Amino acid sequence: MSNLDPIKRFVRRNRLHACTPVSLQAIYLLVDIRRLPLSSATMGFAFVGKTTKVIGINEHLHPFEQRMVVCHELAHQILRHPNSFYLCELNGWWYSRLELEAQRGAALILLPIRPLQALARRGWSVVELQNHFEVPGELVTLRLGMATRGL
């Protein structure tokens, strides 16, 4: 059993990998997502209250980065990380176990492994893969690395 199993169950339950790029429509129905004028160092945040869940995304980010931030913040919630407020800072997911786990969760949500590996085996570059799946290249690299470790 993996720490990321709740993410895998969420993906299956919501049939998120039915198409590529992954549609975030099911997520938008579950969580209040707001695009906000945040500082350049802040990619987004999540707040989980007793009756509300809000994800804020920096409106100045590239759309691929916005998709990643939504799923990163959602992963914190699905994985029930401690706290009720999470802050996603620019490249901040490399600095703590929970942030890296949320980033891996985002990779699981946004990058169905079979299509990703099939295209990678055909020689698609990271840039081609990021454009196809509408995610930042670093997320493609992370997901391919996770697959080699069986995640």
Image (cartoon, rainbow, N blue to C red):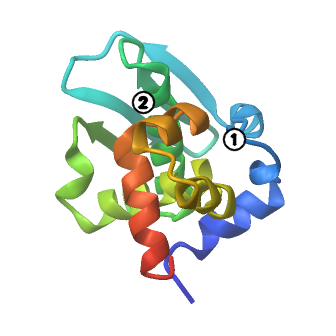
Q: Is residue 23 above or below residue 61?
A: below
Q: Is residue 67 above or below residue 92?
A: above
Q: Is residue 147 left or right of residue 136?
A: right
Q: Nearer the viewer, residue 62 or 144?
A: 144
Q: Is residue 53 above or below residue 106?
A: above
Q: Nearer the viewer, residue 30 or 112?
A: 112
- Residue 57 is marked as none
Which corner quadrant holds the N terminus?
bottom right
Kind of residue indicated by mark 2: Glu
Asked whether residue 84 is in view, the answer is no
Q: Is residue 125 above or below residue 43?
A: below
Identify the secondary structure beneath mark 1: loop
**Residue 49 location, x and y as percent?**
53, 43
Q: Is residue 128 left or right of residue 89?
A: right
**Residue 15 location, x and y as percent?**
82, 53
Crowding around mark 2 (Cα neighbors within 10 Å: few <14, some 14 to 19, many 20+) is: some
Crowding around mark 1 (Cα neighbors within 10 Å: few <14, some 14 to 19, many 20+) is: some
Give the number of marks: 2
Kind of residue indicated by mark 1: Val
- The residue where tag 1 is placed is 22
- The residue where tag 2 is placed is 65
**Residue 75 location, x and y as percent?**
51, 54
Residue drawn at (49%, 78%), measured in percent from left and top? 3
Residue drawn at (30%, 40%), measured in percent from left and top? 87
> Alpha carbon of mark 2 to alpha carbon of mark 1: how far?
14 Å
Residue drawn at (50%, 76%), measured in percent from left and top? 151
Residue drawn at (35%, 9%), measured in percent from left and top? 37
Identify the secondary structure beneath mark 2: helix
